[in-house]
Amino acid sequence: MCGIAGYMNADPRKPVDPQTLVNMAAIQYHRGPDGFGYEVMDDRGVGFSHARLSIIDLDVERGRQPFVSRDGNLMLSHNGEFYDYKRIRADLTSRGEQFRAKSDSALVLHLYPRVGLEGMLKQLRGEFAFALYDKQKDRMILVRDRFGIKPLYWTQVNGTVVFGSEVKTLFAHPEVPRRFS
Protein backbone atom coordinates (compact mmCIF):
# COMPACT_ATOMS: atom_id res chain seq x y z
CA MET A 1 0.00 0.00 0.00
CA CYS A 2 1.77 3.10 -1.29
CA GLY A 3 0.49 6.64 -1.37
CA ILE A 4 0.33 8.89 -4.42
CA ALA A 5 -0.32 12.61 -4.62
CA GLY A 6 0.32 15.64 -6.74
CA TYR A 7 -1.19 18.46 -8.70
CA MET A 8 -1.36 20.12 -12.09
CA ASN A 9 -1.84 23.82 -12.67
CA ALA A 10 -3.94 24.90 -15.65
CA ASP A 11 -1.40 27.67 -16.20
CA PRO A 12 1.92 25.94 -16.97
CA ARG A 13 3.81 29.08 -15.91
CA LYS A 14 2.50 28.72 -12.36
CA PRO A 15 5.30 26.90 -10.51
CA VAL A 16 4.89 23.71 -8.50
CA ASP A 17 6.09 23.99 -4.91
CA PRO A 18 8.35 21.00 -4.08
CA GLN A 19 7.66 21.49 -0.36
CA THR A 20 3.95 20.94 -0.97
CA LEU A 21 4.78 17.64 -2.71
CA VAL A 22 7.02 16.61 0.20
CA ASN A 23 4.21 17.48 2.63
CA MET A 24 1.76 15.39 0.60
CA ALA A 25 4.09 12.38 0.76
CA ALA A 26 4.79 12.91 4.48
CA ILE A 27 1.07 12.82 5.31
CA GLN A 28 1.00 9.35 3.74
CA TYR A 29 4.08 8.02 5.52
CA HIS A 30 2.00 5.23 7.09
CA ARG A 31 1.10 4.03 3.57
CA GLY A 32 4.71 3.80 2.43
CA PRO A 33 7.41 3.99 5.09
CA ASP A 34 10.16 2.66 2.77
CA GLY A 35 10.89 6.00 1.17
CA PHE A 36 9.37 8.85 -0.74
CA GLY A 37 10.03 10.81 -3.86
CA TYR A 38 8.72 13.68 -5.91
CA GLU A 39 9.14 14.92 -9.46
CA VAL A 40 8.31 18.26 -10.99
CA MET A 41 7.94 19.28 -14.62
CA ASP A 42 8.66 22.96 -14.11
CA ASP A 43 7.78 24.05 -17.61
CA ARG A 44 4.35 22.39 -17.33
CA GLY A 45 3.16 23.24 -13.80
CA VAL A 46 2.91 19.57 -12.84
CA GLY A 47 4.30 17.71 -9.84
CA PHE A 48 3.77 14.24 -8.38
CA SER A 49 4.86 12.69 -5.08
CA HIS A 50 4.93 9.14 -3.79
CA ALA A 51 5.20 7.39 -0.41
CA ARG A 52 6.70 3.97 -1.07
CA LEU A 53 6.06 0.55 0.39
CA SER A 54 8.63 -1.81 -1.15
CA ILE A 55 7.13 -5.10 -2.22
CA ILE A 56 8.27 -6.12 -5.71
CA ASP A 57 11.41 -4.12 -6.55
CA LEU A 58 13.29 -3.73 -3.26
CA ASP A 59 16.13 -1.64 -4.71
CA VAL A 60 15.73 1.84 -3.20
CA GLU A 61 17.02 3.78 -6.20
CA ARG A 62 15.53 1.67 -8.96
CA GLY A 63 12.08 1.53 -7.36
CA ARG A 64 11.77 5.15 -6.25
CA GLN A 65 8.74 6.90 -7.69
CA PRO A 66 7.48 9.00 -9.34
CA PHE A 67 8.95 7.49 -12.49
CA VAL A 68 9.84 9.59 -15.52
CA SER A 69 10.20 7.90 -18.91
CA ARG A 70 13.60 7.88 -20.60
CA ASP A 71 12.51 10.48 -23.12
CA GLY A 72 11.12 12.73 -20.36
CA ASN A 73 7.63 12.69 -21.86
CA LEU A 74 5.80 10.67 -19.20
CA MET A 75 5.65 10.95 -15.43
CA LEU A 76 3.98 8.29 -13.27
CA SER A 77 3.02 7.80 -9.64
CA HIS A 78 1.41 4.42 -8.94
CA ASN A 79 -0.19 2.71 -5.97
CA GLY A 80 -1.20 -0.93 -6.06
CA GLU A 81 -0.41 -4.04 -8.03
CA PHE A 82 -0.83 -5.27 -11.59
CA TYR A 83 -1.51 -8.98 -11.15
CA ASP A 84 -0.26 -10.19 -14.54
CA TYR A 85 2.70 -7.84 -14.84
CA LYS A 86 5.21 -10.66 -15.48
CA ARG A 87 3.33 -11.79 -18.59
CA ILE A 88 2.93 -8.25 -19.92
CA ARG A 89 6.54 -7.41 -19.14
CA ALA A 90 7.78 -10.54 -20.93
CA ASP A 91 5.71 -9.62 -23.99
CA LEU A 92 7.01 -6.05 -24.00
CA THR A 93 10.61 -7.23 -23.53
CA SER A 94 10.24 -9.58 -26.50
CA ARG A 95 9.17 -6.53 -28.55
CA GLY A 96 12.32 -4.62 -27.64
CA GLU A 97 11.31 -2.67 -24.54
CA GLN A 98 14.04 -2.21 -21.95
CA PHE A 99 13.00 -1.73 -18.34
CA ARG A 100 15.08 0.21 -15.82
CA ALA A 101 13.01 -1.00 -12.85
CA LYS A 102 11.72 -4.42 -11.85
CA SER A 103 8.55 -2.87 -10.47
CA ASP A 104 5.17 -3.69 -11.96
CA SER A 105 4.52 0.07 -12.00
CA ALA A 106 6.96 0.54 -14.87
CA LEU A 107 4.54 -1.26 -17.21
CA VAL A 108 2.54 1.93 -17.63
CA LEU A 109 5.51 3.84 -19.05
CA HIS A 110 5.95 1.17 -21.72
CA LEU A 111 2.34 0.17 -22.47
CA TYR A 112 0.85 3.66 -22.81
CA PRO A 113 3.11 4.83 -25.69
CA ARG A 114 2.60 1.53 -27.55
CA VAL A 115 -1.15 0.99 -27.27
CA GLY A 116 -2.60 4.25 -25.93
CA LEU A 117 -4.76 4.78 -22.90
CA GLU A 118 -7.70 2.55 -23.89
CA GLY A 119 -5.46 -0.28 -25.08
CA MET A 120 -3.40 -0.10 -21.90
CA LEU A 121 -6.43 -0.14 -19.60
CA LYS A 122 -7.79 -3.25 -21.33
CA GLN A 123 -4.60 -5.11 -20.39
CA LEU A 124 -4.26 -4.04 -16.76
CA ARG A 125 -5.69 -6.35 -14.12
CA GLY A 126 -5.30 -5.78 -10.41
CA GLU A 127 -5.89 -3.26 -7.69
CA PHE A 128 -4.36 0.11 -8.52
CA ALA A 129 -4.58 3.84 -8.72
CA PHE A 130 -2.14 5.97 -10.67
CA ALA A 131 -1.48 9.39 -12.07
CA LEU A 132 0.14 9.66 -15.48
CA TYR A 133 1.22 12.91 -17.07
CA ASP A 134 1.80 13.01 -20.83
CA LYS A 135 3.94 16.05 -21.62
CA GLN A 136 3.48 15.79 -25.39
CA LYS A 137 -0.33 15.87 -25.07
CA ASP A 138 -0.20 18.10 -21.98
CA ARG A 139 -2.66 15.95 -20.09
CA MET A 140 -2.81 14.34 -16.70
CA ILE A 141 -4.67 11.06 -16.44
CA LEU A 142 -5.97 9.79 -13.09
CA VAL A 143 -6.87 6.08 -13.12
CA ARG A 144 -8.39 3.80 -10.52
CA ASP A 145 -9.01 0.06 -10.78
CA ARG A 146 -12.44 -1.07 -11.90
CA PHE A 147 -13.62 -2.02 -8.40
CA GLY A 148 -12.19 1.00 -6.59
CA ILE A 149 -10.01 -1.07 -4.28
CA LYS A 150 -7.21 1.50 -4.25
CA PRO A 151 -8.46 4.96 -3.31
CA LEU A 152 -7.99 8.06 -5.41
CA TYR A 153 -9.37 11.43 -4.38
CA TRP A 154 -9.18 14.66 -6.34
CA THR A 155 -10.43 18.20 -6.35
CA GLN A 156 -10.16 21.22 -8.59
CA VAL A 157 -9.53 24.66 -7.12
CA ASN A 158 -8.40 27.93 -8.72
CA GLY A 159 -7.35 26.24 -11.96
CA THR A 160 -5.42 23.47 -10.23
CA VAL A 161 -6.29 19.77 -10.05
CA VAL A 162 -5.04 18.21 -6.81
CA PHE A 163 -5.10 14.44 -6.19
CA GLY A 164 -4.04 11.90 -3.58
CA SER A 165 -4.61 8.49 -2.05
CA GLU A 166 -6.24 10.09 0.99
CA VAL A 167 -8.49 13.12 1.44
CA LYS A 168 -6.12 14.66 3.97
CA THR A 169 -3.41 14.64 1.30
CA LEU A 170 -5.45 17.15 -0.69
CA PHE A 171 -5.42 19.50 2.29
CA ALA A 172 -1.62 19.71 2.12
CA HIS A 173 -2.09 21.95 -0.92
CA PRO A 174 -2.47 25.51 0.38
CA GLU A 175 -5.33 26.43 -1.99
CA VAL A 176 -7.60 23.49 -1.10
CA PRO A 177 -10.33 24.66 1.28
CA ARG A 178 -10.91 22.57 4.41
CA ARG A 179 -14.55 21.87 3.66
CA PHE A 180 -16.60 19.41 1.64
CA SER A 181 -18.87 20.38 -1.24
Image (tube, helix red, strand yellow):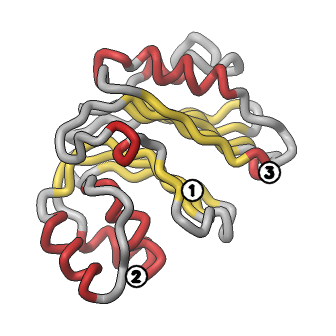
Residue 117 makes an appearance in the image? yes
Asked whether, in this view, residue 13 is left or right of residue 152, the answer is right
Question: What secondary structure is found at the residue carrying circle 3?
Answer: helix
Q: Determine crowd level at label 2: few under 14, some 14-19, many 20+ residues with C-alpha closer than 10 A.
A: few
Mark 2 or mark 1: which comes first in sequence? Answer: 2
Name the mark on residue 43.
3
> Whole-Å distance between the Cαs marked 3 and 1?
13 Å
Above-or-below relation of 136 to 179: below
Location of residue 162 by image quarter: top right
Residue 181 makes an appearance in the image? no
Mark 2 or mark 3: which comes first in sequence? Answer: 3
Q: Nearer the viewer, mark 2 or mark 3?
A: 3
Location of residue 121 by image quarter: bottom left
Quadrant (top left, top right, bottom left, bottom right) of the C terminus = top right
Residue at the spot 24% in from the left edge and 35% down from the top edge: 54
Q: Determine crowd level at label 1: few under 14, some 14-19, many 20+ residues with C-alpha closer than 10 A.
A: many
**Amino acid type of disc 3?**
Asp
Residue where numbered disc 2 is placed: 115
Q: Determine crowd level at label 3: few under 14, some 14-19, many 20+ residues with C-alpha closer than 10 A.
A: few
**Amino acid type of disc 1?**
Tyr
Quadrant (top left, top right, bottom left, bottom right) of the N terminus = top left
Residue at the spot 24% in from the left edge and 46% down from the top edge: 57
Residue where numbered disc 1 is placed: 133
Q: Do the residues labelled 2 and 3 touch (CB within 8 Å)?
A: no
Location of residue 28 by image quarter: top left
